[in-house]
Amino acid sequence: MLIEFRVKNYRSLRDEQVLSLVASKDKTLQDTHTQATGIRAALFLVRSAVVYGANASGKSNLIQALQNMRKVVIQSATYKPGETLTAQPFRLDADSINQPIECEVTFLLDGVRYQYGFALTTQRVVSEHLLVYQAFKPQRWFTRRFDTDTGKDVYEFGPGLKGPKNLWEGATRPNALFLSMAVQLNSDSLRPVFDWFESRLFIINESAPLTWSIQRLQQADGNQEICNFLSSADTGIANITVETRWVQFPRISLSDLGSMTHDAIRNAVQFRDGKTEVQSGEIKSHKLRFRHVTERGEAVFDEMDESSGTRKLLRFAGPVLDILRDGKTLVVDELDASLHSLLLRELVRLFHDSETNTGGAQLIFTTHNTSLLDAPDLFRRDQVWLVEKDRDQASSLVSLSEFSPRKNEALERGYLTGRYGGVPLLNPLGLKH
């Protein structure tokens, strides 16, 4: 489970911001909305968190910062020498624009707490560190820092990290993470940290890849689970079949392109010198057929005959069911797009239900849907976060708990009237000054 995410100097997040999933001492909804950890530093973690804020307040930047961290961990070992890293510092003051971006996550995996972070510019990794809490006291497995005087990285290793550390150090390029390179060179000790980013942290926007759901639909049990999931949302869908075929390209129609997986599209299309080139060959394409049944008859529809809300729910069905089953962390930007408020509430409740969330899965999402704030027993105060920009256009992140709202307070009205921040300061149509 994710315990905490820290970020500094990434886009509008100039100053260090902390998203904490550590539950407060409030006992409200503790049995359903929190998960016991067995560690003293964070006895309970919340199973979901929602982030509110005005348009352009920095909500998406928070998600993108975590997404960029995941990308660098997974991909940096494969970067070519001199290949630039993705680092977008705060650009509205001279000090920040020349400083590295900083990210750190703390997570719990198999009873062990890991605290991993790094700082980087577009040119190189400036620092990197890993602390491991196998007991209450941390072990510093490694630190790395760039020495500007010598132009070299300086490493320090702790006894907890096993393996050919000097080999991994020598193989790590300036634009690669030591963690990523060591895992590529078969570090068993660091593999759990890498795997958490790659396999247990899922970050998607409102257009989740359809691939995950298609894979489940092609399995008998998975197909039934997804159909039940959609049926419970009153979509009227009784059954979904997947028709698979091989498509020749470059003669690919727009409908074929829509049913192709991301990997297939990436294989079919390449970008050279700013131009798009379609490669020759054939790829696997999937066509979905939706069967609706009523008392007066039945019919089969194509994917595009379904509503945008149904199509979006289908895209989320695969990832959500996998994450609930395996106890992973799902992060979604603008989860409410195309979803009815009642449906969104039920999606959140899946993560709070011990029967559906058996492994400590977590859901973190941004939204503008303020009706969730007053939905009965949907959120504890420590699950609600607010993002707001100051006069310098720098974003700040604060928990609703810090405002100490009363138990029966109308949170939606309080939020919309600006009591907690995170709402736009409107100048009607921008016409009055």
Image (tube, rainbow, N blue to C red):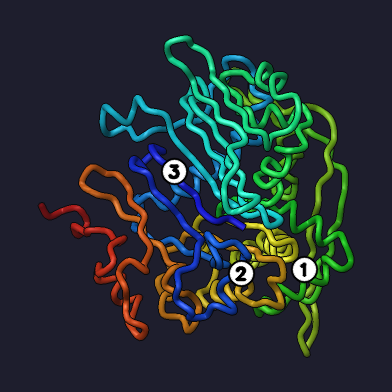
At a point 75% along the width and 67% down the height, the residue shown is 301
Query: Callout 1: 10 Å neighbours few (<14), some, many (20+)?
Result: some
Q: CA distance from mark 3 to mark 2?
A: 26 Å
Q: Which mark is residue 106?
A: none
Q: Which residue is mark 3?
A: 7
**Quadrant in the rendering for residue 111:** bottom right
At a point 79% along the width and 72% down the height, the residue shown is 291
Can you name the residue that lies furthest to the left here?
Answer: 433
| Callout 1 amino acid | Phe
Query: Callout 2: 10 Å neighbours few (<14), some, many (20+)?
Result: some
Question: Callout 1: helix, strand or loop?
Answer: strand
- Please name whichever residue, 233 or 302, is drawn nearer the observer in this view of the structure: 233
Q: Which residue is mark 1?
A: 290
Q: Position of residue 406 (x, y in %)?
A: 32, 81
**Quadrant in the rendering for residue 218:** bottom right
Q: Position of residue 85 (x, y in %)?
A: 53, 26
Q: State which tag comes first along the sequence, 1 or 3.
A: 3
- Tell me: residue 328, above or below residue 342: above
- In the rendered image, the quadrant that contains the N terminus is bottom right
- Please name whichever residue, 79 or 205, is drawn nearer the observer in this view of the structure: 79
- Please name whichever residue, 411 or 207, is drawn nearer the observer in this view of the structure: 411
Q: Are marks 1 and 2 in contact (CB under 8 Å)?
A: no
Question: Callout 3: helix, strand or loop?
Answer: strand
Q: State which tag comes first along the sequence, 3 or 2.
A: 3
- Please name whichever residue, 397 or 145, is drawn nearer the observer in this view of the structure: 145
Q: CA distance from mark 1 to mark 2?
A: 41 Å
| Callout 3 amino acid | Val
Q: Is residue 130 visible?
A: yes
